[in-house]
Image (spheres, grey):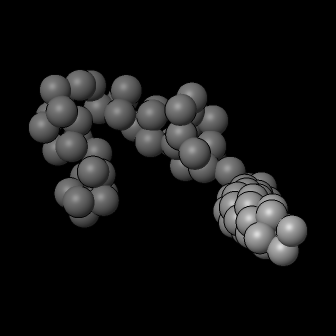
């Protein structure tokens, strides 16, 4: 929101109804990743989080495919008897 006001912390603080010092502190902590609840991590951690997300999606797909193949194998085994 500060960026929307061209970096004007005092105007943003006034719009939010909070003190300029509080907003400035929050902004500084968010930029350094020390504000609780922010998701600003190191680039290495971000890369790991993205890779983890992709791997979870791949695992879910593989599990669904495996279940389908198990059901198909059971169906064809039953049909060939």
Q: Is residue 55 visible?
A: no
21 left or right of 45?
A: left
Q: Is residue 34 above or below residue 62?
A: above
Q: Residue furthest front?
A: 81
Say which of 14 and 80 sits in front: 80
**Residue 79, picture quadrant:** bottom right
- Residue lying furthest left: 15
Residue 66 picture quarter = bottom right
How many numbered marks are there?
0
Q: Nearer the viewer, residue 64 or 11?
A: 64
Instruction: Name the image quarter holding the C terminus.
Output: bottom right
> x%, y% of residue 6?
25, 63
Front one among 25 and 51: 51
Residue drawn at x 80%, y 64% as measured from the top left: 78
Q: Position of residue 65 (x, y in %)?
A: 73, 68
The quarter holding residue 36 reads top right
At 74% from the left and 66% from the top, the residue drawn is: 75
Residue 55 pos. (x, y %): 77, 63
Q: Residue at x 60, y 49 (%)?
A: 40
Q: Is residue 10 visible?
A: yes
Residue 5 screen position, x and y as percent: 20, 57
Q: At x 30% / y 59%, what residue is drawn?
A: 3
Say if 22 sits above or below 28 in the image: above
In-front residue for pair 80/46:
80
């Amino acid at each position: 929101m500060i960026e929307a006001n061209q970096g004007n912390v005092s105007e943003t603080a006034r719009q939010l109804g909070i003190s300029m010092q509080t907003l400035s502190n929050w902004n500084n902590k968010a930029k350094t990743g020390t504000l609780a609840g922010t998701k600003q991590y190191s680039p290495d951690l971000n890369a790991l989080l993205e890779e983890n997300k992709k791997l979870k999606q791949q695992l879910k797909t593989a599990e669904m495919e495996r279940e389908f193949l198990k059901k198909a194998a059971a169906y064809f085994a039953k049909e060939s008897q």
